[in-house]
Amino acid sequence: MSAELKTRILIVEDDPGLQRQLKWALDGFEVDCASTRTEAVAVARRFEPAIVLQDLGLPPDPDGVEEGFATISELLRIGPTMKIVVVTGREGREHALRAIRLGAYDFCQKPVDLPVLAHIIDRARRIHELEEDNRRLAESRPANVLDGVIGASEPMMKVCRLVRKLAPTQATVLLLGESGTGKERLAQALHALSERAPQPMVAINCAAIPEALLESELFGYERGAFTGAVKQTRGKIELADGGTLFLDEIGDMPLALQAKLLRFLQERVIERVGGRELIAVDVRIVAATHRDLQAAIAEKAFREDLFYRISEVAVNIPPLRERGADAVLIANYLLQAACRRHGKPLLKLAPDAIAAIEQYRWPGNVRELENRVNAAAIMVEGKTVTAEDLSLDPPTEETGVPLSLREARRHAENAAVQRALAVAGGNISKAAELLGVTRPTLYEILERTSPTLAK
C-alpha cells in the first residue's frame, strides 16, 4: 500500500506481530502504534491521525470488546472526522457492526487480507481528504461568499473560479443547469463578490407568478392602473436599483413580457404599468433557467435577441451526477447542518450510505440530496445513517462496492492490473514490472480476473 501524501494512520493493536505486519504494509503512510486505550488517546491528541486501525480486544480485557468500544468513543470525541476501521476476528462481525453504529467508518476481518484493507483505507483516506479540503475552504473564504456552494470536483471548482472572475464585472450572466443544482446560490455569490454587494439583490421566479401579474411585479404600477391598484407600487426592477436583479427560470417568461424586458435591457429605463414616466434604473441582471433556450428559440417560445442580451456570459452548472465525490462531501455537510438544526447529536454516514450516494444518479440534484439527508437526520435513532435511512438502494458489486472479502480482493487486483496495463500500453512485461510481480504471476492474475486479456 502507498499514498501520494503522507496520511497519518494509528494502529491500535496489542499483538506485536500484527502491529509489525500492518506497519510494514503501510510503509507509504505515517504510522503510529498503540497497545492500550491510554496510549491510543495520547497519540490521537498529539498527531490527530486521519485513519485508525483498531482491534476491539485491548488490555486490560484482551478477550473482551468493551475496552475497544470505549476507545472508539474516546477517539471520536477527540477527532470526529477520524475514520476508524475496526480489525476483528471472523466471529466478531456483530461487534464490528456495533462499532459502526457507534461511529466507526468500516471493519476488516482477521486474518487481515491486505488488498481488502488497502481498498478500505484508500476509500477512507479519500473521504477524509475531501472533508478536510472543504473545511479549509470554508475557513479561508469570507462569510457569505459562495456560501453553501460545497464541492471539490474539478467541474464545480471551474464554475466557482468563473463566478469569482465574473463577479466584479458588470456582465449580464446566464446560469444554466438542471433544477436543484444551486443556481440561486451562485447568483447570490455573484452579487456578494461584486461592488454592488452593499445594495439589494432582488429575486423573482418567472415561473412561480401568474402571467397576468408578472408584468406588474417586475415593472411596478401606478395607482388606478387596474382594479385593486390603490397606490403607486414599485416593481422588482426598481427595488433592485443599484444592486442585482435575479431573474430565476427566465425560460418560462411569457413572450409578450420578453419584449418589454428586452427594451429595458437595451435602454435601461422602465415604465410602470399604467404610467407614462420613463424611470432610469441602474441594475445588473443575473438570469437562470433549467430549460434549453436554444430549443425554445427554435420553437418560437423564447426571443433570440433577448437570449443574446441575457447571456453575455453563460455559466453551465454541472448536475450532481457529474461531480464525482462531491455528492458524499455535500451529504456530510448537510448531515451535520441538519443535526445542529434539529438539536441532535452529530451523525456519520455508514459505508453503505457512502457507496449508495456515489452510485445514485440524483435526478433532483442537491435539492433531492438535502431532502433525503434531512429526513434521515430526523428519523435515525443510532449514530450512523445507512443507505436504508436515505431511502436508497443498497450498493452492489457492479457499482464498485465489494460484497465479500474475496470479491473485494478480486476487485482491487483487477483495478490495479487494468491500470498497469493501460500505463504499459498493453505490454505484459512492463505491466508486471510496474506491479512488482513476475510475468507468470501476472498471467495467473489475468487468468483469474480477466481471462480474455490473458490469451
Image (cartoon, rainbow, N blue to C red):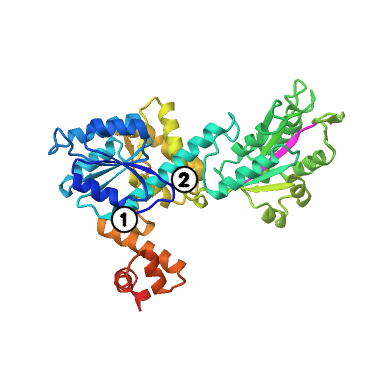
Packing grade of label 2 (10 A; few <14, some 14-19, many >=20) is many
Q: Kindly give the residue lying farthest to the bottom in the view shown.
A: 455
Q: Amino acid at mark 1?
A: Pro
Crowd rating for badge 1 (residues with CA inside 10 Å; few <14, some 14–19, many 20+): some
Res. 145 image quadrant: top right
Residue 301 position, x and y percent, is 71, 51
Q: Position of residue 255 (x, y in %)?
A: 74, 46
Which segment is the magenta one? 282-289
Residue 402 is tagged as 1
Q: Position of residue 357 (x, y in %)?
A: 41, 47
Quarter of the picture containing the C terminus is bottom left
Eyeballing the image, is 280 above or below 5? above
Q: Residue at x 33, y 67 (%)?
A: 437
Q: Which residue is mark 2?
A: 327
Residue sitting farthest toward the left:
63
Q: Is residue 403 visible?
A: no
Give the residue displayed 38% in from the left and 56% down from the top. Answer: 399
User: In the rendered image of this protein, does residue 80 appear above or below residue 94?
Assistant: above
Task: Say which quarter of the image contains residue 410.
Answer: bottom left
Query: Is residue 214 depicted above or below 391 in this figure?
Result: above
Could you say where residue 219 lies in the image, as x and y percent from the top left? Answer: 76, 32
Residue 283 located within the stretch drawn in magenta: yes
Q: Sequence-wise, which precedes: disc 2 or disc 1?
A: 2
Identify which amino acid the numbered label 2 is placed on.
Ala
